[in-house]
Amino acid sequence: MSSEVLTDAINGLAAIILLTSIVLVASKRMRSLVRTFMIQSLALGMFAAVVAYYTGADHIYIVAVLTIALKVFVIPYFLEYTIDKIHVKKEIEPLVGIPMSLLICAGLAFVGYYVSEPIIASGDAITKNCFAISLAVVLIGLFLMISRRKAMTEVIAILVIENGIFLGAISITYGMPLIVEIGVFFDVLVAALIMGIFAYKINRTFETLDTTFMRRLRD
Amino acid sequence: MLIELLILMPLLLALLFYFLNGRHWVEMLTVVASFASFIIAIMIGVDVAGNGPISYWLWYIDSLSVFMLGIITFVSLIVSVYSVSYIGHDYSEREIGISQVKMYYILLQLFIMSMLVVVMSNNLGVMWIAIEGTTLASTFLVGFYEKDTSLEAAWKYIIICSVGIALALFGTVLTYASSIEVLGESSDALNWTTLRDIAPLLDPTFLKIAFIFIVVGYGTKVGLVPMHTWLPDAHSQAPSPISALMSGVLLNCAFYGIIRFFIITEIRVPGFAPDIMLIFGLLSLIVAASFIMIAKDFKRLLAYSSIEHMGIVCLGFGLGGFLGIFGALFHMLNHSLTKCMMFIGAGNILQKFNTRAIDEVKGVATVMPITGAVFLLGALAITGSPPFGAFLSEVIIMQAGINSGSYLIVALYIALLVIVFAGFMYHVTKMVFGNPTEGVSKGEIHKFSLVPMLVLLVMVLVIGVFMPAELTDFLEDVARIVPGGSP
């Protein structure tokens, strides 16, 4: 493959990652949230694989395989299992309306590009454009975290933030040392499991997953 | 060899506890193992003092790591002994079952293990993994009682800290990126020692942005304002031994992460990192002082006091110079010992009065004379009154501020310390004196819990009155690692 095709593929996949995070913000149902997250993770895994092919850095292939295995299969499967088990009401109930949310996301994408301008200018790696997208995805993840009420959406938001950071890590550094990557994956997996268990316990105790009911601890 | 032993021991114990059934065996092994860890930490410390930093594979241990190791293993020992009393009481009151007791000790070991990895790893990525590991291991401990309030605290804890830690990962990635043009994609480019050696060549733009992400990220776990909101909830809802461990050790561990990045940033772009530390330090002091004034729950009072003290440590690093850094390190030690003692006292009061509300606790001195006395002395110690250790370190940091000519900051610092003292003593004297709340029987809750409390009291007194020359020499040695920390 010529390098032009590869560059197109890299940019295209990064664009899919950004678009899916905006779709996540627009999702009204829990299940479509998990599905969209799966697509985003698949795009991230493929992104890693293309970067690995382009740079010849073998250890990024392992990152790609781990991303797809954990974030496309294991974690979404576990989240869907939890959602099924607690018979949660499937609607998301955003605190900020969806049209407004989308506008804010567009603004956040601009912020990502604006902030990363000086960093992109100084570098030469072909993936550096993706750094702006990774910042935008992290910001959108943070917005998703604060604007949705269900405990499960908070879990997805953290996973989206982590996807954004992985995109950034691959695009500006071609991936971190392998031992670190594996450790990070392990932590993400365990964190998702623990959060799932707590979502279950919260639902059992409060009879809802709505975190706005958790207001007992205050000064 | 000793390093691996120190890390494998808690891991193996956790596994063993899973299969073990007797409560007394688990308790005894916990105490014996934490004592052994303390001895091993001292042996490592002697080795480092004699032969210089140890560095191989993933590990790097210099005197800063030894300092943290000492705090972690010692406070863990104290907490292990206290856990026997505290968890034993809950078990005999039938608040928790045997499986929960076992889970407590298993998670305690994993929690301690991940903190040990934090301070011994050379690789900044591994350090990140371990700090996230401390959150994962302690979440179930925060939500241990499975009540609505403890679940709320645990949920806030894991969500807020995970987001914070994710930002710290971003900072770590950016630091790694700043080294790529110098080192290429070598696998040891995330090693702290490598980064320190090539620090003058790193990309300053990346490094500055990275440091901000690191302070916000790890600062979430340190409890710096405005990322502190999980801290009072988690500290008040966790079982008291865990509160002591979190406040006395976990906050220091996260701070240790910031210090490592602080050193690298300070070598490349001097003056940038201290300014950020000053801002967060002052902000934490101001907010903590206001919440201490209006506290209604005595465990939350102690939690806000932890935020205040982390603010003081930040201020020490921000003011810089030998005195600032020496004072900040010394203050970390004093805070750990004193706060651990206070949380043990608070645990005894909580189990006796069955409430966390300050208004409902009266006459601790009459009901539990020793706990009451230690709690009162502890309150004096933690607010920085002479002759306790925290007084010395707070004065040293003040002197650092005067030396650097930041009179406005010093004035603000003193005013806030006075406010904290007034607020704290107002609440504590109300609790300790007066006629006991009705329906509370006299007598100490558990004689065994007095031992760790008195040991800590003697230690903060000895440090405050005599300030052993060995400790001063050692802390000077640690301060030398930080740029500008040479006397």
Image (spheres, coloured by chain):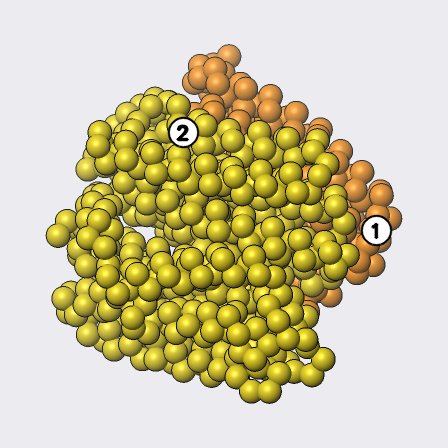
Chain colours: A orange, B yellow
Residue B109 drawn at (x, y percent): 56, 40
- Amino acid type of the residue that numbered disc 2 sits on in the rendered structure: Ile
Q: What residue is shown with label 1?
A: A88
Does residue B462 show up? yes
Residue positioned 55% across, 54% down in the render: B82
- Extreme residue in the right direction: A87
Residue positioned 80% across, 44% down in the render: A83
Residue B107 drawn at (x, y percent): 61, 42
Tell me if mark 2 has few (under 14), some (14-19) or many (20+) residues whose alpha carbon lies within 10 angstroms of its own.
some
Relative depth, front residue between A163 and B410: B410
B107 is higher (above) or lower (below) than A100: above
User: How many angstroms separate mark 2 from mark 1 (CA)?
Assistant: 47 Å
- Residue B6 as seen in the image, left or right of residue B10: left
B230 is higher (above) or lower (below) than A67: below
Residue B4 drawn at (x, y percent): 44, 26
Residue A211, quarter of picture: bottom right
Does residue B246 show up? no
Residue positioned 22% across, 29% down in the render: B51
Chain letter for the residue marked with disc 1 in the picture: A
Residue B232 drawn at (x, y percent): 55, 64
Q: What residue is shown with label 2?
A: B3
Label 1: state its secondary structure: loop
Do the residues at pointers 2 and 1 share their chain?
A: no
- Amino acid type of the residue that numbered disc 1 sits on in the rendered structure: Val
Label 2: state its secondary structure: helix
Residue positioned 83% across, 51% down in the render: A88
Relative depth, front residue between B59 and B160: B59
Quadrant showing the N terminus of chain B: top left
Q: Nearer the viewer, mark 2 or mark 1?
A: 2
